[in-house]
Image: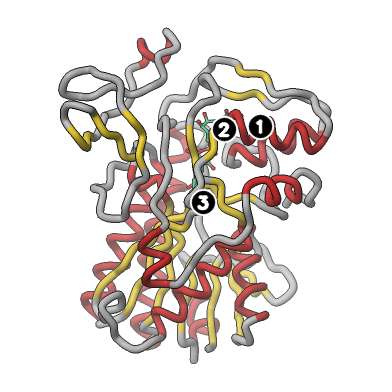
Amino acid sequence: MRVLITGAAGFIGGHAADAFRRAGHEVTGLDLRAAPGVTAGDVRDGRALDGPLRGMDLVVHQAAKVGLGADVADLPDYASVNVYGTAVLLAAMARHGVGRLVLASSMVVYGEGAYDCAEHGRVRPGPRAVRDLERGRFEPRCPRCGAALDPAAIGEDAPPDPRNAYATTKLAQEHLAAGWARETGGTAVALRYHNVYGPRMPRDTPYAGVAAIFRSALERGAAPRVFEDGRQRRDFVHVRDVAEANLAAADLAAGPASSAREPGRLVAYNVASGVPHTVGEMAAALASERGGPDPVVTGGYRLGDVRHITASPERAREELGFRASIGFAEGMREFSTAPLG
Ligand code: UD1
């Protein structure tokens, strides 16, 4: 296939480009930053897309402004790059008759993960109150009776509940892509990445994921600073597995119509390892691989963070044939000394 990968000079886009090339596809990269095999261009610039889109079979859209952001001053940038940029890209794809899209989405579209109350079954707790966080009460409670909850793996049909600007723009991208698919008869696959880590992960910035922040701290000889009580659960998935999920999604988007792939519709998949870990365990694993210093649990918190978010990888397993192959211990061992971006 001839594939255009946006964000191809970035962390996940770069690994996706490697995987598509290894699988024998013809890859064109587009990124704000030029790099070997990557043309410099902005997805918000429709004219800059005309050349790269010509003759393409598929677009893998990874270009985005990521992370939690520093503060509300970031809002216009998130909306511009992620929402407007996707709109310009989809319009250009329609102009060029490119009818297949794989979209980098995120588990942040769910907000909090899934929770079960012994009394009320599956519930959706709202954002945690500042007064609870201040008192070290980190676990969300049942919104109906206030009881303790059991965290569970979230499935793709859970209603979205984005909690910050980045999450809102990722959900908007999914909605725009679904509208594009309906109107053009195109196929769109949204991959909801869980916590991606691995070689070339961007280092410590306000926009970086926690694994890179801990890794950068250890490199400076500083202790990873674990927020809350360290027992918040995430699904850490290796970037090479994520690249493989993109390949599988491309095959689905390009394949014959099936129950999973109907033209005119967007299908979303969790991209996760299926094996949750706590943030404290992740800090401990990296620290131990590097021979210290040991993590410090600070009890601090960030507004906008969710407590637990872990995924069911079932739908991706059944419909994409995707199964993460790099385990937590092995992945963290490699990541503890791998180059950062
Ligand atoms: C992260 C990404 C999000 C991405 C998603 C799926 C960021 C900021 N968030 O969401 O963009 O879509 O994965 O790939 O990149 N923490 C610490 N110490 C720190 C920093 C964070 O303990 O120094 C804790 C946080 O409080 C949180 C957890 O680590 O509980 C995860 O944080 P982070 O990786 O930033 O965000 P996610 O919400 O998991």
Q: Are marks 2 and 1 in contact (CB under 8 Å)?
A: yes
Mark 3 Cβ and ligand 1 under 8 Å apart: no
Camera-near label (1 vs 3) is 1
Label 3 environment density (alpha carbons within 10 Å; few <14, some 14–19, many ≥20): some
Ligand 1 closer than 8 Å to label 2 CB = yes
Q: Is mark 1 within 8 Å of ligand 1?
A: yes
Q: Which residue is mark 1?
A: 283
Dot 1 or dot 3: first in sequence order is: 3
- Pick whichever of labels 2 and 3 is earlier in the sequence: 3
Q: Where, by quadrant of the figure, is residue 317 drawn? A: bottom left
| Left or right, 323 with reference to 177 | right
Q: Secondary structure at mark 1?
A: helix
The residue located at (68%, 30%) in the rendering is 284
Residue drawn where x is 44% and y is 31% of the image: 305
In the image, is residue 227 above or below residue 204? Answer: above
Dots 2, 3 in contact, CB < 8 A: no
- Check disc 1 and give the amino acid type: Ala
Does residue 264 sit above or below 289 in this rendering?
below
Residue 39 x %, y %: 64, 74
Residue beneath label 2, please? 279
Residue 1, position as x, y percentages in the image: 53, 89
Q: Which residue is drawn at the image coordinates 41% and 48% (left, top)?
A: 311
Q: CA distance from mark 2 to mark 3?
A: 23 Å
Q: Please determine whether, in this image, residue 144 is positioned above or below residue 174.
A: above
What amino acid type should be assigned to the residue bearing mark 3?
A: Lys
Q: Amino acid at mark 2?
A: Val
State the residue position of label 3: 65
Q: How many residues crowd mark 2 within 10 Å: few (<14), some (14–19), many (20+)?
A: many
Between 295 and 185, the residue placed more toward the observer is 295
